[in-house]
Image (cartoon, helix red, strand yellow):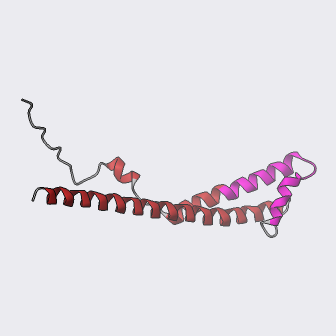
Amino acid sequence: MTEPIEPIELSETLPRSATLLFAPLDKRAFGAAIGVAVGLVIFAVTAIDLAFHSSPWPGLSLLNQYFAGYSVTWPGALIGLAWGFAVGFCAGWFVAFVRNLVLAISLFVLQSRAELGETRDFLDHI
């Protein structure tokens, strides 16, 4: 005859790595990080184009359709830096918001299912 399997005891605390995995992102910090990165990329691409090419690349000058005041010049590179930060901040903030929302909903659904499963087991034993 086989020995009965003893139930595994679940601890109420999560390991530190799991806690960090499910921690919400700071929306302002994530937005600022993405904003700085996008702004610096636009500035760097404009600066490289100005430094190494005698005529501006036509594709780069299309950014003035999206960013008011942008042009492939040194003042335009600074304007592109500011616009890149603004757009990157908004995009980063929104991504962090959506990630936090999806994570919260997912954890709520998982917790509700787990609690419902415990209730079913309890009612089966009555």
In front of the other: 84 or 102? 102
Question: Is 55 inside the magenta-drawn segment?
Answer: yes
Determine whether, in the image, residue 38 is placed left or right of residue 25: right
Question: Is 26 inside the magenta-drawn segment?
Answer: no
Which residue is at a point 82% across and 69% down the rendered structure image?
Answer: 69
Instruction: Name the residue at the bottom extreme.
Output: 68
Number of on-image labels: 0
Q: Main secondary structure of the magenta part?
A: helix
Instruction: Name the residue at the left extreme.
Output: 1
Q: Looking at the rendering, in which quadrant would you find the C terminus?
A: bottom left
The image position of residue 45, as x and y in percent, is: 77, 51
Determine whether, in the image, residue 65 is placed left or right of residue 109: right
The image position of residue 30, as x and y in percent, is: 54, 60
Please report the bounds of the magenta region as a residue range. 38-65
Which residue is at a point 30% across and 48% down the rendered structure image?
Answer: 15
Which residue is at a point 77% across and 66% down the rendered structure image?
Answer: 67
The image position of residue 77, as x and y in percent, is: 79, 60
